[in-house]
Amino acid sequence: MSTPTSPPHDATHVEQPKVSSLKKFAAGSRGVIRAYPSATRIVSITLLTFLAILATFYISDTQNPAIGEGAAVAVAVLGLTWLTGWSGQVSLGNSGFMMVGAYTASLWINHHPSATQPSSYGIGLVLAVAVGAVTGLILGLPATRLRGPYLAGMTIAFAVVIPSFIQTLSFAGGSGGLQVFALTPPQWFVNFFNDQEYGYQIANAQWPTDIVIAIAGFSFLIMANLFHSKLGRSMRMVRDNDVAAELAGINLPRMRALAFVISASFGALGGALFIYIANTITPEEPFQFTFGITLLTLMVVGGIGTLWGAAIAGVVFAYQGPWIAWLSSHVGISSTTNLGQQMPNILFSGILILTMLLAPRGIVGGIQDLVRIVKKLLASSASRSETSPESPSDNASGDAATHSPS
Amino acid sequence: MIALLASLDSFLSSRIMTDLFYGLALGVIYALVALSLVIIWQSTHVLNFAQGAMATFATFVGMTQLDRGLNWWVCFAIAILFGFLFGGFTERVLIRPLYGKPEINPIVVMVGLLGLLEAIGQTFWSSSTRNYPAPFSQDYWQLHGRLVALSAWVIFEFFLAVVIMVSILILFQFTNIGLRLRAAALAPEVARLLGVRVNRMLTLGWMIASAVGTIAAIIVTAGTGGLNVNVMDAFFVSGFIAAAIGGLDSPVGAVIGGIVLGVTTDFVRDYWSGNAAQLTPLVALLVVLMIRPEGLFSKSTTRRV
């Protein structure tokens, strides 16, 4: 799971006597990246977020909400990947955190109508994170004393109990759930972006998606910094060797509980963002406990413990509908039959099992292995000026965005 | 004499006894699910998250044979046999490659199997609830016009549960196979050295557990319970909680935990509120795990940290 963050092969490239100017640039940029890691994180994640928002301009309005939902799910997967990949605690209950966040935000917005107060969406998010953090603390305290399957079992109990508990709360709309109006930004904000002079404007259906992507990008930035903070390093030490961590003066119970609090906050934020796009929440949809399994699948398939894994998870979630429809139509399964309706679940669960049995490090792990093999081949075949300059520099920026912890 | 009988009537139909009977009927199901989880945990140190789904699947396979006009007891036997074989198949194909891997791997695979079985089940049998008859009447008894929360079916349920628990006790404690099963689970290396086919024993442990789980699923779904692909989800969670309260490596703890959990939940429902009853198992789990993380009846030492 843990490889050194700075690739060791770089030193040989820098010290080579004859290098092309392109290569010098690559080596120089790598030096900059290493000298200013946090600035690089900020720049690269901001850039990628900007690219994602740009992409929504070229995606149809029917697909755009799914992209927004994918971004929201990516935030929740980020919380799960922090808990499982970095602190080593397996949770199946993060759908429960999403539900808590979604209900908190929905309740606030229902009592403070968004039509008159656009700020209620923002306050809803803040409240969702706060309530999510408290929920995470309540669940995290007993979790400090539990390991592996006990912990996973307790979290699945949480995910099953939360919906049936919320169903009994009369102020939460019972089994009918709650409605949230579509996320609409305030007029001054819209005017700021919609330039009248050039007749350029953003479609109404696209606004929520873009805002959710921007917030998701911000969450990725926070998580990237968490990964590289003292907290993140301590967390990994707790995961890899708890005795050594305790010897080093790390308070294990506090670390484990804190991991839950942070994970729950991200889960609640993801849940609230999801509802801003989906607009309806009931105890059965969309955060029933099988959604926790979906989250786990997405995380495992993307790659446990990596930012790229969470991002891939978001993309997979956003495009699962069209991809599965395409697959079904090519295999000749009608969407009205039982099999057609169950295709997503069958595929997700099947892929989860196969990934875990055959490639437990997911897509990111697979790509990392591939890059390593390619590099080894290149290094052995010709270590002169023949090597392609693109692939190392590509990889350097990739490393900067994730600092590939696994 | 008549006065005594009359007081017996009022005693059996009293609120406390009614709750006790309801709670016991629920508790033995929890106990059976917990027992099947504990058997698997003891043999392979895997928590079988797909336990409920596997049991429901086997119940579907057996009980849909009623539509072909087969006898109820034949269908019952088919379901248990299928559960038995399915448990062994799962251990062989999905769990065996994962021995010695990080503990997250079997958890994720079993969760994947849970999703897969529920999806395949809905493909075959749709998501709607179907009812199939119970072999005994489920009408509660009337004693001189007073309702007693017992029926022929509930008595059968108690009887079946006791038979299973006793036979598992005998199997594990007093037979040669049981000795080998325990040896394979406790000290696989030594057992192998002494000529025990350890892998076979692990598979057998899964088969027995899966069959016990299937019986629990049939008790839940027969008659008015209704058979549904997701029906065992909640029972799996309660069964897990019962097993965790008792200690995942203690069959006796699993049974006691299940029965206590069922009775407690029903008393909370009746004397406090349904909302509180929803949260009772989770709260019970949290409280017990705070006090004794390894469960109340576990003999294993606390993990040092």
Image: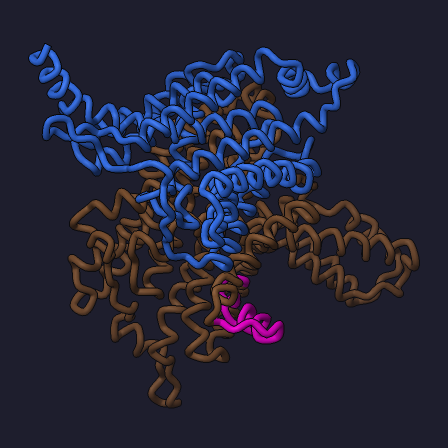
Residue range corresponding to the magenta coloring: A316-335
What residue lies at 46% left-to-right and 42% top-to-bottom? A92
User: Where's the C terminus of chain A, which quadrant?
Assistant: top right
**How are the residues colored?**
by chain
Reply above or below: A248 against A51: above
Q: Please tell me in which quadrant of the rendered image residue A140 appears.
A: top left
Q: Position of residue B133 (x, y in %)?
A: 36, 45
Q: Is residue A274 left or right of residue A351?
A: left
Q: Main secondary structure of the magenta part?
A: helix
Q: Please tell me in which quadrant of the rendered image residue B12 appears.
A: top left
What residue lies at 69% left-to-right and 31% top-to-bottom? B100
Q: Position of residue A76 (x, y in %)?
A: 44, 51
A117 or B38, which lies in front?
B38
Q: How many marks?
A: 0
Q: Is residue B212 left or right of residue B144?
A: right
Q: Is residue B29 visible?
A: yes
Provide the letter of the chain coloured brown: A
Reply above or below: A122 against A231: below
> Residue at the right extreme?
A381
User: Where's the N terminus of chain A, which quadrant?
Assistant: top right
The verdict on residue A200 being magenta is no
B189 or B293, which lies in front?
B189
* Chain B, chosen colour in render: blue
What residue lies at 58% left-to-right and 36% top-to-bottom? B84
Q: Is residue A281 left or right of residue A289?
A: left
Q: Is residue A381 left or right of residue A164?
A: right
Reply above or below: B203 against A271: above
Reply above or below: A290 against A317: above
Q: Position of residue A333 (x, y in %)?
A: 56, 71
The verdict on residue A329 being magenta is yes
